Image (tube, grey):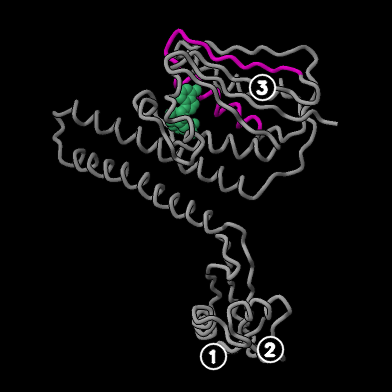
Amino acid sequence: MLADAQGRVTLANKQARRWLRGSGRSVRLPQPVQALVRRVATSGISEGLEVPAPSGGGHRLWIEALSLDFAKTALGGDVLVLVEEREGSGVAAEVYRHLMRTIAHELRTPLTAIMGHTDILASCSIEEEGLWRRSQQFIAGEVERLARLVEDLLTLSRLDLGVSALVPVNLQVVVEEALSALWQSAEEKGVTLTLQAAPELPRVRGDADRLRQVFINLLDNGVKYTPSGGWVTVRLMSGKDQVRVEIHDTGMGIPQTDLPHIFDPLFRGDEARRAATGTGLGLTIVRTILAQHGAEILVQSEPEHGTTFSFALPIAA
Ligand code: ADP
C-alpha cells in the first residue's frame, strides 16, 4: 500500500485492505505502523517493524516502510508499505535475539581477558620472562579462537543464503580430502584416522565443498574429544537409494543431558571445554549443510566409550 506523510493510506491492494479490516480499521494504519510511516516520511530512511499478526498462532507480520524519495508519487503516496506474514517468525526472532546475546557474551569474555593480559605485558619488567610468556601465549590462543569464531559465524551466514545446485559427487574423494586435512593434527595427538568404504560406491547428490566441511567438522571433533591411542573411523555404506555414512570415535562420549543441545548454536559441553578449544558452531554448521542436502544427522553416544554420528545422502540419478 501507499501512505502519505501523515500515515494515511492513499492506495491499498486487496490483501492490504483485508489486513486493515482485520485490525479493525478501514483506512487507518495501526498506531505503531502509522508512527513508522511518519518517521520514514520525515527521515527518508526506510525501516522495518515486526508486529503480531491478527490471525494469532505465533505468526508475525513484517512491515517494511520504504521511502519514495522522488517526492510524492502520482498516486499521492510518500511511503510504500509492504506487509509480509511470516509463519512462526516470532520463534525465529527469539532464537535470533538469543544468538545475538550469546555472541556478544562469547566475544566480551575473551576480549576482557585479553585486555587484562595486555595490561600485564605493559607493566611487567623485562626480567619477568615467565609471566611475559604466559600472557603472550594466552593472548595468542584467545585471538586464534576468536578468529575461528568469526570464521564459523561467516560460514553460517553464507549457508543462510541457501545452496547452489546439487550435482553428482564422489563421496569417497570428499572424505579422503577431509581426512588429509586432519591427518597432521590426529597424528600429533596420537589418534588414528581410518576409512572403511564399500567398493564401487554410487555418487551422491550434493555440493562437494559443503560436504567436505561436514566431514572436516565431524572428524575434527572426533580427534579433539578422543584421547591419545584412540580411533576415529569413517564408514561409507551402500544402501538402496542412499549412501549411509557413520563417523565413529572411541573418545570421551557425550553426557545424556547434553545430547539434545549439541546442535544448538554456540553450545559447548563442560567436559569438552576442559578437553579442547572450540567455537560451539561446528555441529550447527554440519546440521545446516546436511539439511540442505535433505539429510538428517543422528547421534549415539556413551560417555567414556565413544560417539557415532550418522546420516544418509541420496544417490545421484
Ligand atoms: P565445539 O567442538 O567447538 O565445542 P561443536 O558444535 O562441534 O562445538 O560441538 C558441540 C558440543 O558437542 C561440543 O562442545 C561437545 O560437548 C559435543 N561433541 C561434539 N562432537 C563430539 C564428539 N565426537 N565426542 C564428544 N563430544 C562431542
Residue 268 point in image, percent of width and height: 41, 33
Residue 13 vs 241, above or below: the answer is below
Residue 194 point in image, percent of width and height: 60, 12
Q: Which residues are magenta?
A: 211-238
Which quadrant of the rendered structure holds the C terminus? top right
Is 75 inside the magenta-drawn segment?
Answer: no
Q: Is residue 214 left or right of residue 228?
A: right
Residue 217 point in image, percent of width and height: 55, 29
Q: Residue furthest top?
A: 229
Under circle 1, the secondary element is: loop
Residue 73: which disc? 2
Q: Nearer the viewer, mark 2 or mark 3?
A: 3
The three-letter amino acid code for the residue at tag 2 is Thr
Q: Residue at coordinates 39% horizontally, 26% vertically from top-left?
A: 272
Residue 2 vs 154, above or below: the answer is below
The three-letter amino acid code for the residue at tag 1 is Gln
Under circle 2, the secondary element is: loop
The three-letter amino acid code for the residue at tag 3 is Val
State the residue position of label 3: 245
Q: Residue at coordinates 44% horizontally, 40% vertically from top-left?
A: 266
Instruction: Name which of mark 1 and mark 3 comes first in the sequence.
Output: 1
Under circle 3, the secondary element is: strand
Q: Residue at coordinates 56% horizontally, 89% vertically from top-left?
A: 5
Q: CA distance from mark 2 to mark 3?
A: 59 Å
Q: Is residue 286 left or right of residue 113?
A: right
Q: Assess disc 1: are there few (<14), some (14-19) or many (≥20) residues with their C-alpha within 10 Å of its C-alpha.
A: some
State the residue position of label 1: 6
Residue 265: which disc? none
Q: Is residue 48 left or right of residue 104?
A: right
Instruction: Name which of mark 2 and mark 3 comes first in the sequence.
Output: 2
Front-lying residue, 82 or 210: 82
